[in-house]
Image (spheres, rainbow, N blue to C red):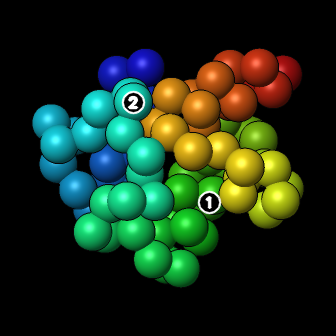
Amino acid sequence: MNEFIDKFSEALEKEASEIDSNDKFRDYEEWDSLAVLSVIAMIKQNYGITIPRKEFDSLLTVEDLHNYISANKG
């Protein structure tokens, strides 16, 4: 989880220490349409997973994102 939070924080240009796994990431001040694209691109680049937008939109917390990646890694 810590590795994911580090990569997630880089994509958002936010300090990793300000991110908790239970946070609703859409509530972050940094969250906007560019952040969506950055996070989706980071997941594809680092984990080789393309999350369909509809599924991405259903994920609420940082932990939800991490769990989705864990469940869908090759």
Residue tagged 1: 41
Q: Residue at x 65, y 44 (%)?
A: 59
The three-letter amino acid code for the residue at tag 1 is Ala
**Neighbour tally class for label 2: few under 14, some 14-19, many 20 plus, Cα within 10 Å:** few
Q: Gap between marks 2 and 1, in whole Å?
A: 22 Å
Observer-nearest of 27 and 34: 27
Mark 1 burial class by Cα count in 10 Å: few <14, some 14-19, many 20+: some
Labels 2, 1: front one: 2
Quadrant in which the C terminus is drawn:
top right
Q: Position of residue 31 (x, y in %)?
A: 40, 69
**Residue 7 makes an appearance in the image:** no
Tell me what residue is drawn at x 72 percent, y 49 percent.
58
Residue 36, above or below 19: below
Q: On the picture, is 66 further left or further right than 48?
A: left
Q: Quadrant of residue 11?
A: bottom left
Element under disc 1? helix
Q: Which residue is mark 2?
A: 22
Q: Earlier in the sequence, mark 2 or mark 1?
A: 2
